Structures are given as structure tokens and as C-alpha cells.
Amino acid sequence: MSHKTRLFSLLIVVLFVGFVFGLAAEEPKYGGELIAGISADPVGFDPHKTSAYSSFEVLENVYNTLVTVGDDLTPQPAIAKSWEVSEDGLTWTFHIREGIKFHNGRTLVAGDIEYSLERIMDPDTGSGAAWRLATVENISAPDDDTVVIALQNPYPGLLTKVGGYKGMAIVAKENVESGKINTHPVGTGPFEFVEHVPGDRVVLSKNEEYWEEELPYLDGINFRVIPDETVRKTSLLTGEVHWIDSVPSQEIEQLKKRDNVVLGESSGTAYWYAAFNLDHEPFGDRRVRKAIAMSINRSEIAAAAKWDAAVANDSPVPEASYWSTDYHPYLGEQNHDKAEELLTEAGYPNGFNAGVMVSTQYPGTVRAAQVMQAQVARIGVNLKIRTLEWGTWLEEQSAGNFDIYINGWIGNLDPDDYFYAQHYTGEVFNFTGYSNEELDELLDEGRMEPVKEKRYELYSEIQKTLIDDAPYVYIYIPKVVHAWRPIVKGYTTRPDEALKFKATWIAS
Amino acid sequence: MTAYITRRLFTTLLIAVGISILVFLIVRTLPGDPARIMLGIQADETRIETLREELGLDKPIFIQYGIWLNNVVHGDLGSSVITGQSVSGSILNRLPVTFSLALSALFVALLIAIPAGTITAVKRDSYLASIITVLSQIGVGIPNFWLGIIFILVFAQWTQLFPSFGYEPLSNGFFSWARHLALPALSVGLITGAIITRFVRSAMLEALNQDFIKVARAKGLRESVVVFRHTFKNAIIPIVTVVGLQLAYLLSGVVVIEVVFALPGLGRLAFNSVTRRDYPMLQGAVLTIAISFTLINLLVDVLYAYLDPRIKY
């Protein structure tokens, strides 16, 4: 456990290239508009309804959540300045900061939190984030400064669930009722929404009455939509934009050498994996799944999918995380003999045919499937790649029309995020059909266990079980990579991919 | 003439209705639905069902069409099921971008094609004509987005003469508008120009072989008069036809160029609506494209009568 002591939190090392100038000590400067190049047009601005990352790139700066997660991904005060948990772990009391104002001038009260969280839970809202509040029994606001969340079971992961994602934003009721929230959101965040020119730009301006002292520094942000990655990179090099949300993975190394670009890298909170359909022959057999898990070379797949922008892993948890373990049975040499042995035991001495489903939405997965196809061919498994457009892919996944699919889970903060929804018996996101009573018990315990060390033991056991049982074959963990001009200061690329510009400023 | 135009406008209407039915059916038989795409990978079935009902997607398809058509007749194209923006508003916002790009690209194309096509026809055996022919062959063969990327590299990244992306409305000043349009207009215009050059050449060649040209030359008219007054005037009908077709194509949105240069035009709107299954937005965009197509055809036909007095409707 000694290696654990240096890893106190989920903190993941954030690397700054070009930080050598020693500008950290420089005084922040007020003013200026940040021009940020983003890769996709936002798809609606109702934080409770949209699931598009492009929307959250903007909304991150418009809204606040009850609590938030800091750069080290641990819970921090936000709208709630403090909180307590009852001894039985069932009642959480949050104390609301005074004087927070919505962009329309109205003062935020505890009732706004009650309203927002209930709106997310209401099935009529159709929020894709409702599952985050699945353990909530009831939310109430006894007075304007207090919010009480009552749970069905003790759940220490509650804070990251309500604070780790802007889909849990605290919204203004009048903005919802006027029907304008999806086109003109009103929040309490550091920047106010000004306008959206679809396909072109989203403009935000400084919230002069923002509650965090002295913030924000910028007068505004102009998000420009630049879909082509080469052009996005070029516009950064020419200085037409100050900051871009992603760079072509194959050009990371080259960009690092330039002195007019700063690259921000962070290992992400996402993991990419291949999932088996256990109801389709022969994937109900654990030996078959293991044979595939041990016959693929994850570094090769990661390199094909993301060039230098991903780390191969046979576990979903990044190595730097508190929750990572030493159990990596598949990371060494590929063991084709053992894999063939397992297939023979399972009754497939000559291999078999199967399909792997990927989507054009994530071109990396298409390349990953091609490499995987070549790798498993060595043990006689003949994979046919089915490349679908995203809408169709989602349909096929939920209908269970696949043998194997490749995809990712993003935004995992609490260890529960990595495993519960994916593998608990009968959960809606358990697309593999995996069911293991012992694992279910461990997952339940892990959710409720308040002592961090004990939780660690539980989640180590869970990881070991899943890696051995292999309903998912974990492949790689992508890095988050942003790039900006050297004049942009006070910006950190975070593992959770949240774009927080409140402390960002532009040097002259 | 008026009767003819009225009749044609009426057919345009019929075509639009026909197209709208076709698009309605095709779009809805595609697998995938907007509710699922909107809610994302972490949404459960009951929420997807709720949203489907809210969007009216649970109703039989002919009822959905009826509702839509009724609204359109009342001037309401509806609003996006994904973003809530009004469809007509979105289209109106994007039309100036598409018009700007289409017309400036056509301007570039004609600036090249008319002289180039004429030279290759009149001075058939010269070196210049051979060079132009080779260049136009190459131009027809290369994709416009590739040319776009090359232009961005050369004129935006290396020399920094032009912006690499984006659109500025004309209301922000002609210079800024033109600067932003220059590279996309050149990328599309050069290639469209190469295509039109070949048509100008063949139309001119055909006209040059007519007996009246021989007569004109026999009369001792100057070559410039022969070429411009007599030949070009007679070659113009097929040229107008192909220019009309090209314009219609440009107006329907040069999707890839709009993506490369991040121009918020009609093509990208339609493309994004397909991937998001944003039915009302897609209906509106396709309807607009279809109507502009038929209107340009009408314009071309009317031009025929104006350019060639022998044509009467």
C-alpha cells in the first residue's frame, strides 16, 4: 500500500508544456475576450435535457451546481458553502451561500435547488442524468438557506453525483417556465449567456455580480464552432482563436515543439472498452471472453485509435487514481497458446465468427476494431466489423443486436461510476446481460461504505472480479488534450474535461 | 409569359409537396430516433418514451405528416426537436451564408470559365489552350475540400493573408465579409469554373462551326466581333443551362466546404439535422433547397426566352 500514500485523492498529474516561463507568479489581468475554438455546435442549452458535450463546454461557465469538484476532483463547496451528514448516513444537510444571484438579478434561494434536483428526477423532464439521484428519497428546503436531501440508503458518492457534472445545474424556475432555457439559459455561473448563432458561435459575457470574489477575469468568451480538426489547429497557430478544445491526436508531438502553443494534457476520467453480448453464443462462456481479453494487444489498439493520446489499460481505472489496483493480468505479453487452450475447452478449437459493432461518431473505435480484428484472427476468431451511424448504433445497442461493441464511459469520478450501472444485474445500462450475485453484493456494499479504506478493498475485489469475468474487455484510457496561445493564463486542463474559464485571463 | 410563370410556380408548389412527403417517409424509415440521440447513451427507456410522446413521435406517420403540413400552410415550419430553435428562423439565418458562398463562388467560376472556355475554342491549337485544357481537367478531378485545406495552409497559416475559418455578415462591412469568403469562394469557384470552362468550350466550338459564322468571317468582320457578338451570343443557351445547374448545386449547400471553413450555411444545417434525426429542421432545410432548385430552373427557362427571341412560352 505504500504507493497509495502518495496518491491521496483522484488527483491526476496535469502536465504543462511551456510552463518554463515561470509565469505562475504573474498578477492576473482583467479584461479581454477569450476566443475559444470548439469542435461541435452546442445541441441545446437546457442542462437537464441535453447530453451533448458541446453544450456542456458552454454551460460549464454559465451554471453552478450545489457542490463542485476541484481540480483534484474532490468535492468542494459551491452554491452550498458547507454540509453535514447524519450519523446513519441517510440525511444530508446543505447550507446555502448567501447573496448568489441569477443572471436575471434574482437572488438564489434553497427552493431553487429543490426545484432543480426535482426537475432532474421527474420522468417527464426526460433527463439523462436522473440516475445520478437514484438513491434520493426526498429533497426539501426547510428555509431559504438550507437544503435537506434524504436518501434511501447511505451513499457517500452523493457529492460527486450532484457536483461532478453540469447536468446537475441549478436552474431558475422562471427560465424553465418561460420555455427559454433551451435557447437562452439563465444561471448563476461566472459568465452570462448572450447569444448563440447556430453553427457559428456562442457568446458569453462576464457576470459582474459573480459570487466568487474577484472572478472572473475575462470580459467574455466567444466560442467559435470549427468542426474540422486541421482548420481548428490552424486557427490556433494563426492566432485567430486563443484556445481549442482538442487537437488531432497524431499532431500532439509536433505541437509540443512549437513555442507559440501551450499544450494541456490530463489523463481522462473515461475508459474505452469492448463489451460482449452474453446472450449471444459463444460469449455466455467466460472462457471465450477471457481468451479474447488475453489475445489482444491494448497498446497497439490504443495507438491506432488515439495515437499518443491514450494509455493502454486492462482496467477501467487510471493508474494515478486512488482506486487503481496492481491487478493487470492482460497487460504483459499476449498469451495466444493459453487463449487457444481456453477456446478449445469451451468447444471452439477452430475459433468462431462474430460481429463487432462500432460507430462513425467515434472514428477511433472503427480503427480500434480493425486492429482487434487482426489480433484475434490469430486465435481463429473471425470478426466482422459493422460500422454504423450513431443514431443507428444506439438503437442496435439498446435492442441487444450485437455480439461485441466498442465504446466508452465518460466522466467517472466516484468508483461506483465505473461499475454499477454497467454490471449490476438488470441495470438499464447493463447491455452485456452480465449477472453475478456476488458482484451485485459487493457493488451494493461499495455504494454504502463510508470508510474510504474499506471502500478501496471492496472496489479492488470488484475490479478483480470484472477483469477475470471479462464482460467488458477494457482497452484504453484516453488523455484530455487542449491547446492554447501562450498569452492565455490561468487555465488548467482537467481530467473530467470540464472547461472552467472563471480564473482564466489574457496577458497583453 | 406571365401565364407561363404562374403555371411554373404552381408546379413548383406541387414539387415541394411531393418532396416533403418523400423526405418525411425516408427520414422516418431511418433507424435511430431523436429522443435517444438527445438523451445520450446514459438514458433509460422510460425517459426515451416520455420524450418521444412529447415530440409527437409516437403518433402514426401520416398523422405526423398531416400536422406538419397543416402548420406549414399556416406559415409555421415548427421548431427543432433537439435545440428548440425555430426552423424558419434557423433557415433564414443561414440563407445569407449559403447565398454569399454560392454567388461569390459562381462569380469566381464565371470570371475564369468565360475567357478560358472562349480561348480554348477560338485558339484551339495554341499552347495557352492546351494549358487551360489540362488545368481544367485537373480542376474537374480534385475535390474542393482538399483545395480548401491547401488554401488554408498557404493563405491562412503560412502567409496569414486571409482568415482560416468563419463567416462575417455583410452588415459588418464589405471588406470583412469578402475576406472571410475569399478562400471558400476560391476553393469552390475554381473547381466550378473548371467544369463550366469545358461547357463554354464545347458550346463555343459548336457555334463557331455554324454557317453564319463563316458568313460573318466572309463579310470581313473583325475577329472580336465574330467571337463576341455572333458566336458567344449563340453559344449562351447551353452555357446558361449549365451555370443554372451549378448555381442550384451551390445553393443546396456545399456541405464539405461549409464544414472545412466553419461556415454556418444551409448544407451544414441539413447535414447536422440528419445525424441528430432532427426531423422538423431537416424537413425545413430540404424543402428550402428543393424550392430554390426549382426556382433557379424557372429562372433559367425565363432567361432562355430573353436571350433567344426564337424561344416563346
Image (tube, rainbow, N blue to C red):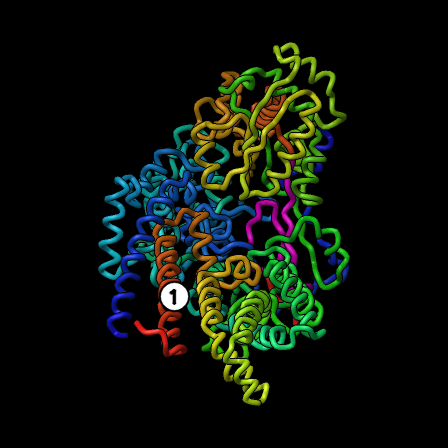
Q: Which residue is drawn at 54% across and 46% down?
A: A69
| Side (left or right) of A412 relative to B130 | left
Residue marked by disc 1: B297
| Side (left or right) of A349 relative to A85 | right
Viewport quadrant of the N terminus of chain B: bottom left
Q: How crowded is mark 1: few (under 14 residues within 10 Å), some or many (20 or more)?
A: some
Magenta span includes A497: yes
Residue A411 visible in the picture:
no
Write the start and end of the magenta stretch as one range: A476-503
Instruction: Report the magenta stretch's main SS.
Output: loop
Q: Residue at x 25, y 53 (%)?
A: B69
The residue nearer to you, when weighing B125 against B56, is B125
SS class, disc 1: helix
* Amino acid found under the numbered disc labelled 1: Asn
Q: Residue at x 39, y 49 (%)?
A: B278
Viewport quadrant of the C terminus of chain B: bottom left
| Side (left or right) of B160 relative to A166 | right
The chain to which mark 1 is attached is: B
Q: Where is residue A16 in the image (x, y as percent from the top left)?
A: 71, 53
Magenta span includes B274: no
The residue nearer to you, when weighing B194 against A184, is B194
Q: Position of residue B217 (x, y in %)?
A: 56, 85
Q: Position of residue A377 (x, y in %)?
A: 68, 25
The residue nearer to you, when weighing B251 against A133, is B251
> Is A394 placed above or below B72 here?
above
Q: Where is residue B228 in the image (x, y as percent from the top left)?
A: 53, 83
Residue A250 visible in the picture:
yes
